[in-house]
Amino acid sequence: MIDFFKLATPGVQGLQPYQPGKPLEELEREYGITNAIKLASNENPIGPSPRALEMVQASLKNLARYPDGNCCLLKTALAKKHGVDMNTLTLGNGSNDVLDLIARTFVTPAHSIIFSEYAFAIYPLVTQAISAKAIVIPATNWGHDLTAMQAAIRDDTRLIFIANPNNPTGTYVDKIRLKTFLDAVPEQVLVVLDEAYYEYAIAENPDYPDSLDWLTDYSNLITTRTFSKAYGLAGLRVGYSISHPDIAHLLNRLRQPFNVNNLAILAATAALDDNEHLEKSIALNRQGMQQLTQAFEAMKLDFIPSLGNFVSVNVGDGAKVYELLLRQGVITRPIGGYNMPQHLRVTIGTAAENERFIKALGEVLNHI
Ligand SMILES: *Cc1c(COP(=O)(O)O)cnc(C)c1O
């Protein structure tokens, strides 16, 4: 038989597939347990707004229809919410779809892409997929070293990915450092600010920049956001970018015409309108973050302060503790793949879920 591997593009031959969090059903099946909890994929523990759920119910009768390819309804709502023009928006099947679109629109194998050590796994993945050169900048205190990232820009650099805050470290770049960086980056180098945890971060820290304030000053800036995290709609897959209209126009050329589905369009539009649910999600996250970090302190475990809905904690041997927690029905995320083998990333859950995790972690660490 033909070796199909040899037929694949060089980029695809070198790909390491993304490792998702373990699904609850899989754990329960494998270990024969029930009532497992999942704190592994930074999902909202209370789910989406009830209004979003109602819209999904109501839209079921339209499933035979293609979605509106322009996503007019959602774009109108986003434009109003953010005070931007509709022509600055590009919607995606999750923001990962948009990150991929940006790379494929602007970057060829002759170009390089800069990102940080410990940065979100999708950046190396999309870079590899298009056979572009990855320039990985060592982190400082687990966070992005913007000075070094700027110094690394070469003539062939087209794109810089910055996760703010970053997953899995939770670290962020503040207003002053980001502004200094943007001032120094040449305008032909696109800067993608991945703000997947924006809603949590902006509520917690006055130093956290809202990059939308700078879009008109820096035409090479692209902000990406998502409905997967604070809005609790990870399963429907919807995210977006806000950029200069010329950039959005190009991204929309390459975008698959129906990349955001009917249910996602309606649910996201309804979710945007429910500020009360968003506030509730943010407050729950704040309390849960305190609950976890206080427990870590009491257990004398080092953790990385985080502006997201997750926190990475040094447990000595992440893979082993992950395995032992699984047996207690608690799914967390080992991050050895990020070269952080001592850490576990834990998503903030409900108070009861956090309590169960803390208890299980205490027992596991006592037996190692
Ligand atoms: C979760 C996450 C995303 C969003 O993924 P979606 O495709 O929108 O679900 C993007 N960037 C980072 C850093 C994330 O952690």
Image (cartoon, rainbow, N blue to C red):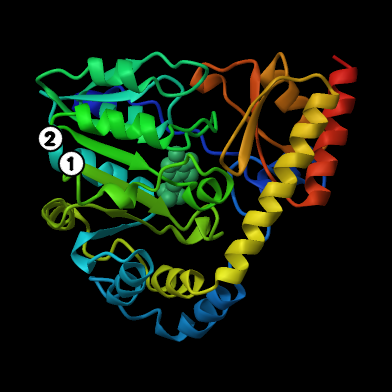
- Name the side, left or right, on which 58 lies relative to 248: right
For residue 276, say whether it is visible. yes
Secondary structure beneath disc 2? loop
The spot of residue 16 in percent (x, y) is 39, 26
Q: Nearer the viewer, residue 326 or 247?
A: 247
- Name the side, left or right, on which 101 lies relative to 200: left
* Amino acid tagged 1: Asn
Ligand 1 placement by image quarter: top left
Q: Nearer the viewer, residue 25 or 312?
A: 312
Q: Residue at x 65, y 15 (%)?
A: 342
Q: Is residue 111 above or below residue 75?
A: above
Secondary structure beneath disc 1? loop
Location of mark 2 (residue): 187
**What is the distance, in whole Å, between disc 1 and disc 2 at their CAs?**
6 Å
Identify the disc placed on residue 220: 1
Q: Residue at x 62, y 54 (%)?
A: 44
- Name the side, left or right, on which 41 lies relative to 177: right
The spot of residue 246 in percent (x, y) is 10, 54
Residue 320 quadrant: top right
Q: Residue at x 84, y 14 (%)?
A: 368
